[in-house]
Structures are given as structure tokens and as C-alpha cells.
Image: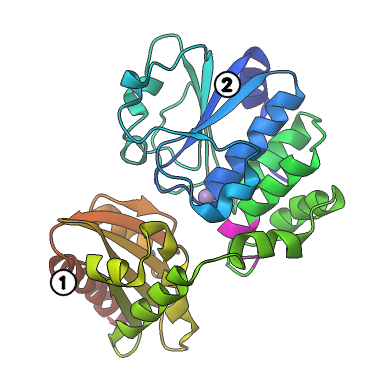
Amino acid sequence: MSQIDFSKALDFLNASSSVLITCHTRCDGDSLGSSVGLAHILRAKGKSAEVILPSALPNRYGFLFDQPPRVIPDDWRSASLAGFDSAVVLDTSVREQLIPQYDFLCTDGLCLLVIDHHLSHESLGTVNIIDPSASSVGLLIAELAQAGSVELSLPASEALFTAIATDTGWFRFANTDSRTYGQTCRLVQNGVEPSRVYQSLYMQEGPSRVRLLARALGSLELSCAGRLACMSLSAEDFSQAQASSSDTEDMVNEPLRIASVQISVMLTQDEPGSVRVSLRSKSQLNVAQVAERFGGGGHSRAAGVQLVGSLDQAKQKIISALTQEFTGLAQ
Ligand SMILES: [Mn+2]
């Protein structure tokens, strides 16, 4: 059972009538599933709720939405958004990940609720529910619904299941605990069929993602006595595989299959002069601390940062920082 006191968040939502729900850029299963789940919960309570995204909706999550959501990648202040009395930010609480919408969210008269589970956080909201021990924001929304005695419909349950399943790597990551299974059990009791959700998410792809995965695996290099794995994807790789940046989701986890590998790094050249670095750890080594040193953040076992410069420069920077970490461990 959760130790979190949801009363302030419930009061906040009860006092709202028209709610804008949003999340971080490069939306993932947790941010999207929890956004859609919360929208269903609010609508069931007779409120109006709209999910607006700051970056494109990856195809695989399209099944969560009845209607394609609005996507506003540029400054939201110029998007003439009106009629909302409150906003909810899910799955992040750092300004850096809310660039298009941040200034709009600070508009006078708009109350802000933040629900997040990342280690790196700022207090951006009027009400902040931050629980780094929660496996996913989907879990927090399911608990919030339970605390507010809200019955979850099948679409709401499916969205929250998607959030929880994706952020726990389908219940295999270290964040999968009894609290997670407890809420997931309730969602399955509501009618969610895990195999159907899995099929919607992962077995409907075009060939581009598999082609891109082949390129990523082809770039694999091991260092630090096999403990550090590094893969990279250049702009050329994306165009050859006819893939887009959302096709990289989860790829960083692949090298963790290797027994000796403790940390996996994936460098992606999303746009010229900018490299996205994803870090995963299966040891005690805290990759959020490493990411924070370069201006990024995340969880101890899953973190990321955006670096300016070429792919080679980014690789050198991050590999040398991680090599130092391993050297530090050996002493
Ligand atoms: Mn999450």
C-alpha cells in the first residue's frame, strides 16, 4: 500500500473543472498512459480534461487515444490555449523537460499539480506529489484513484496498465515491487488483457525499428573490462533505416543481456549538433548522478542527458565520465 498522502492532489482535482494534462517531451509509455488514465478519471467525475503533448505521439501509443491528441512542439503561449482552470504535469518535474509549455504553465490563474517519480525534481507545482520509490506515474495515478474511491473504467485501466508495464520493462526491472503488482492486479481485474496490450504496443511495427536495432547492435563497443557497453546511432543510421527518433525506445536495454555489462549507454544524433544520451545501469552505480553532472537527470538505474556537439565528442565525454566511475568503484 502507498504511504503517499493524496488528499492535496484530490482536493486540487475536485476544485478543478477544466484540466489540461501534459508531460515531458519525448513522451513515453508512462507519461502517455498516466495522462490518458487521469483524463478518463477526471471525465468520469464530470470534469473536462484534455491531454496536450509537447512532442509527437509515437505510433505505438496511438491505441490509448480515442482521438489523436493535440501536439504543440513550440511555445504554448502563442497557441492561444484558453478555458483551462488548472494543469497537471506528469512524469517530470524539471523545467528542462517542459520547454514548449513551461512559460504557459506559469500563466497567472492557472493552478498546477505535478505528479512525478524521478529522483531529480524541482517544486514546480502549486501541489507536488513526488515519490521516487514509485515504479511509475501510472502506479501513482492508480493509487490516487483508489484514494479518491474512483472506479476505473476499462480504457482508464488499460492506459494505467500501459504506463506501469512500460516503466517497469514489463515487470522485470528492479522497480517492480508488491505495490506495483497490487495495483496491476486491480487493473487486470477491471478487464485489462496484458497480452492484448503487449501486442498493440510491440507487435504492430513496420520494418524500420528492427532495421535501426540492427544498426545499433552493430555499433556496440565494450570497455572497462566488459562492464561498459556503448552503442550509437547517427543521422545517417536513421535515414538508412528510414526510422525516426521514437524508434529507439528501449534499445539501450539490449546490451544489459551481456553478463559482464553493468552500464549501457546509447548515443543518438537526433538533430545536427545535439546528441541524446540514454544511460541504464544494472549495478549499484547511479547513472542519474552521472547524467546530472552534464545537466540531465533521471533514476539511479535509468537516466538521460542531451549534449551539444558531435556524436564523437559526446561519446568521449560520457565514456570518460563513466570510466572514472568504474575506476572509483575499484578503489
Ligand atoms: Mn515514468
Sequence-wise first label, 1 or 2:
2
Q: Quadrant of residue 72?
A: top left
Q: Which mark is residue 316?
A: 1
Residue 290 showing in the rendered view:
no
Q: Which residues are magenta?
A: 165-171
Identified by mark 2, the residue type is: Val
In this view, the residue farthest toward the top is: 109
Quarter of the image with the C terminus is bottom left
Residue at horizontal 18%, vertical 67%?
311
- Going 30% across and 90% down the picture, which residue do you hit? 225
Q: Kindly identify the residue that appears in the image at 27 percent across and 85 percent down.
A: 224
What secondary structure is found at the residue carrying circle 1?
helix
> To which residue does mark 2 refer?
19
Amino acid identity at mark 1 = Gln
Res 319 quadrant in image: bottom left
Q: Residues within 10 Å of mark 2 (few under 14, many from 20)?
A: many
Q: Indicate left or right for 35 with 186 as reference.
A: left
